[in-house]
Image: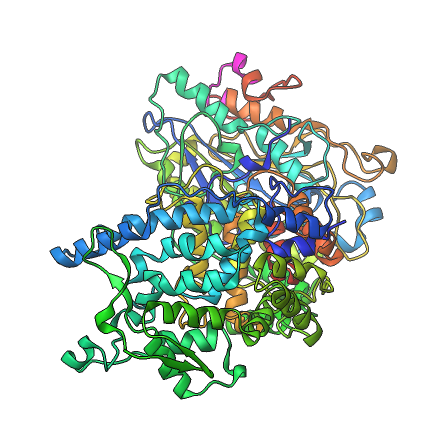
Amino acid sequence: MRPVSAINRFGWGQRESARDGAGLSLRDWLAHQLTGPDTATFRGVSPCADGLIALREQRRTKVQGDPLVKPIFQGEVATQMDTLLLTDQPFRERLAWFWFNHFTVSLRQGSTRAVIGAYMREAIRPHVTGRFSDMLLAVMRHPAMLMYLDNASSIGPGSVAGRKSHHGLNENLARECLELHTVSPAAGYNQGDVTSFAAILTGWGVDMKADRPGFVFREKAHEPGPKTLMGQTFPEGEDGGVQALHFLGTHPATYRHIATQMVRHFVSDTPSPASVRHVETVLRDSEGDLQAASLALADLPDPGPGGGKFRSPMDYATAVLRALSVGGEPSRPDDPHSPAHQLTSAFSTLGQPLWTAPLPNGWSDDAADWCAPADMLARADWAWRVAAHVRSGDPMDIADIALGPALRPQTRTAMHHAGSRQDALALLFSSPEFQRR
Amino acid sequence: MMISRRTALLGLAGSWTLGRSSLAFAGSSGGPDDPRLVVVILRGALDGLSAVTPYGDPGLVTYRRALVLPEPGQEGGLLDLGGFYGLHPSLANLHGLYGEGQMLPIHAVAGHYRSRSHFEAQDYLESGADERLDSGWLNRAVAVLQGKANRPDGYGLAMGLTVPLLLRGAARVGSYAPAGSQHPDADLYSQILALNAHDPVTGPAFRSALKARGFSEASRMDMGAPTAPEKSRKPDAFTRLSTAAGQMLATPHGPRIAALEIGGWDTHAGQLGRLGSPLAQLDRGIGALRQGLGESWKRTVVLAMTEFGRTVRINGTGGTDHGTGTVAFLAGGAVAGGKVGGTWPGLRSSQLFENRDLAPTTDLRAVAAGVLCDHLHLPSRAVATVFPGPAVDPMKGLVVPV
């Protein structure tokens, strides 16, 4: 039988009503979530182009505040948070957020508020069970990434626009793509490769003036001539970039890097070489099939209760609210009391505000970054406040659903002796076993 | 009756609670002469034998020598309630009210249900039934009274907090809690600390965080030691809520019914040292209610009730476990007090409920119904609506005849 710890590790915390495919083995249960279509339905959202139009109008009219972009953003948050709370494909959902974090776009720079929700739905989600190199290409062409990492303003110094304006390369996207998204420094590339890759990507930008704003290849900003990246030569033009990304997206060093990231996210802060090798081999043999690689994670030894991953604030808050069966009716985007809003305000309270990673390397996957004294106290206090609102049901049932056999006898006893539901649930959510998945 | 956990949450809007006490109002405002009712839920099971001690029963010492306080008149002794019972010395305000004829403990009460689960029993206590209902008996009483007086719905003060099941239901009620520190109290923190003590990651983190907050691990370790005398300090959460409740109930067109709750009663270990503090809080709270109500105190009944009592025998850790019969308190200017109500069941082993608990002789619903009928003038035919299930015979003589 699947241990609850594994279900939590691969998902977002057990929810009473979740269809968990009882009777399936762990691997079959995971496969079941990936082989069928994505069941998430996003209400009231619109394509990236609409976000760009809103942004363009705001800039054109110089209005105060954020009147056009704000509703788009709030709508994205509401429906994507509802999905997180209610999903019956928790593994797929975790993979989507894992890849979002791998290809981080943050609200902290680049005016990404108008497009960040669309980025998740358009560039990340469709490729979670597809090929890594396809996801990479979708990400690198998405306006959110081009805006976030400044490529939209990178100009080949030898291009028409470069010679005229004396503007030049912006290496930001090229460097992060090599370092974080694909081969990683372990591949041994040098500054010349970074510069060269930046030149390859010149011209990849966002056309804000079009009827349907979006990705554009600007010939005039593109650095002319073939370029060499890590010993490979790529032709001038948009296709040179596509080829370079395919080269990077299928590179053995990339497979090793993303295998390491996946094992780190799903199994342990310190992945064992054997585990990494297992996933890496699957990636290499399948030409970067993320569905196969994701399922290969189920082959790895289960670290067992207490040996698993420490929950990030996002993990933790989601698991608490899922354990309490929060959510159901669609969240209204402007309703500060909606389940979606409760979830995002918890992320902020606990130190991981939604879509605001400080740097392009995304949120940390290390316990050490989430377990500071103030963090733990914030969790206990928040859980206790949330638990005040639970007015029915047996806390032990909630504990059994949330943790199953991972619930320690000591916690069970403390909960039994608690004088109120609120205290019992606060103890559950403050127990060391609930801090892990 | 089964309730899906999907309905478990009221919605997390306005997460306002304060310490372990909270307050919610129901309104049916008419005029200044309206009767007032305050119900205090003591969550966690108050040990009735320690709050109102039957020192005249020789069985007491047999079972409880280590928990029994000195008899009235001695140093640190009980406060006498007429020669057989003594009030816990932390309940000085209540003792004063007793002397004024405004306090009526009723002993050996229990709800009609028999459950030793806090959560079930609190649900039943508030539902006023032997099962969990979607509404509380106080709300159903409010609904009847509002209908009777033809008052518009929604007269309750709405000021933001979770409403206990007791007051939830068809009649609209408001809620209020002052802004303030919203975090667990020291006792719960120490339990959280204990749960994490041996964890290499969370243990040191919680220790350090709580130390920074000025929390001392020793506070829980000195179980069994007598409670230190209360220092003068800012009022605790329950007292502040009680003051606010009293003031709001006193306003000419304010709410007329309020519910408060206070925890800290679940004394499984070191009961002697741990019970004084919640009792003193309750006592101060009732004093604050009186002060807040002012002139309206004379038209007020306060009912303090708990979900069940505790075992007559002491357990292995100087505490008591979940039991059955316990005490309920009525206080207020409208209470016909100055005596101890109820029927004493005795403490011989054959007299105990299941040879373990104080045997209940009074149905707590009858106490509540008696107050509703004689104080709030709930029509007697409505009693079955307020307390569905086994028939309730409202207790007589609990309030001063108007």
Q: Name the residue rendered at 72%, 45% in the picture.
A: A24
* Quarter occupied by the C terminus of chain A: bottom right
Q: Is residue A154 left or right of residue B113?
A: left
Q: Is residue B131 left or right of residue B159?
A: right
Residue B301 drawn at (x, y percent): 49, 32
Q: Which one is in front, A194 or B84? A: A194
Q: In the picture shown, does residue A168 fall above or below A21?
A: below
Residue most toward the right?
B350
Residue A202 drawn at (x, y percent): 30, 74
Q: Name the residue rendered at 28%, 48% in the picture.
A: A71
Q: Which one is in front, A262 or A245? A: A245
In this figure, which colouring scheme has been used for the structure? rainbow
Q: Which one is in front, B351 or B22? A: B22
Q: Which one is in front, A272 or A170? A: A170
Quadrant location of residue B159? top left
Residue B375 shown in magenta: yes
Residue A149 shown in magenta: no
- Can you see residue B367? yes
Residue most toward the left?
A61
Residue A145 drawn at (x, y percent): 36, 65
Image: magenta residue range: B374-383
Residue A232 drawn at (x, y percent): 45, 80
